[in-house]
Amino acid sequence: MDELIQCFNENAVRYLVFGGQAVRLEGMPRFSMDWDLFIPGKDAANMERINELLGDELDMPLLPIGPRGENLIQTYQTRWGIVQFHLAVVGIRSFDEAEAHASEHPNENGVMVKTFSLEDLIASKEAVGRPQDLEDVEFLKIRKQSKA
Amino acid sequence: MKRTDDYKAKLELWAAEGRVVRMPRAVGFPAFGSRRFSSGAEMNAWKKELLAETARRGGVRWTN
């Protein structure tokens, strides 16, 4: 995934990693089968940039969100792994707000990854509320205290 | 001898260190075409089926 993240960073793609990978970047040894990326659902230029940069990796283009929530989540099997683009995220008011207080973490190879803030990670996981999300929340709350 | 696995202590240790652990890569998921979903529930149902299909095929291989 380093190649993809670096490419997004170098080309000023607006994205935020959240979900299991973001929890891992906070320090929890945790497996996740995919990468969840929040992108602004109505930023056509950003979406077009992603479509151009990923080219043949996408067997169908990313589309903006529809009036009834169509295309909310778009999943691709790429050479870097399974990538899921989310055009809205439960528990998060808007991409712009999440982006305004986003975090940046070096991953295990030193590549800078833009992620949700701890507060937004907690909010999104609490909103989904599956058992694994609640385990993550327990870790994230301790992490937040340790950073305070 | 008493043996315990203190999960909360692990969380506290991981949270204090904040060390990013390299994740092994899973190879061997069944090939699938791209998908578009209108809700998280729809996506989670698909993901559950993908994992079940992966298990039926013998699981994934873990690589570095």
Image (cartoon, rainbow, N blue to C red):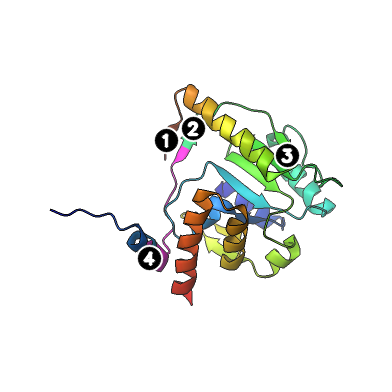
Question: Residue B27: which numbered mark, if any?
Answer: 2
Question: Residue B12: which numbered mark, if any?
Answer: 4
The answer to whether any part of residue A78 appears in the image is no
Mark closer to the observer (3, 2): 3
Mark 4: amino acid:
Glu
- The answer to the question of whether label 2 and label 1 lie on touching residues, with beta carbons closer than 8 A, is yes
Q: Is residue A32 left or right of residue B46?
A: left
Q: Are marks 1 and 4 on the same chain?
A: yes
Q: Position of residue B44 (x, y in %)?
A: 62, 40
Per the image, label 1 sits on a secondary structure element best described as strand
- The answer to the question of whether label 3 and label 1 lie on touching residues, with beta carbons closer than 8 A, is no
Per the image, label 2 sits on a secondary structure element best described as strand
Q: Nearer the viewer, residue A142 or B30?
A: A142
Q: Which residues are magenta?
A: B14-25
Q: Are marks 3 and 1 on the same chain?
A: yes
Q: Earlier in the sequence, mark 3 or mark 2?
A: 2
The answer to whether any part of residue A36 appears in the image is yes
Question: Residue B62: which numbered mark, if any?
Answer: 1
- The answer to the question of whether label 1 and label 4 lie on touching residues, with beta carbons closer than 8 A, is no
Mark closer to the observer (1, 4): 4
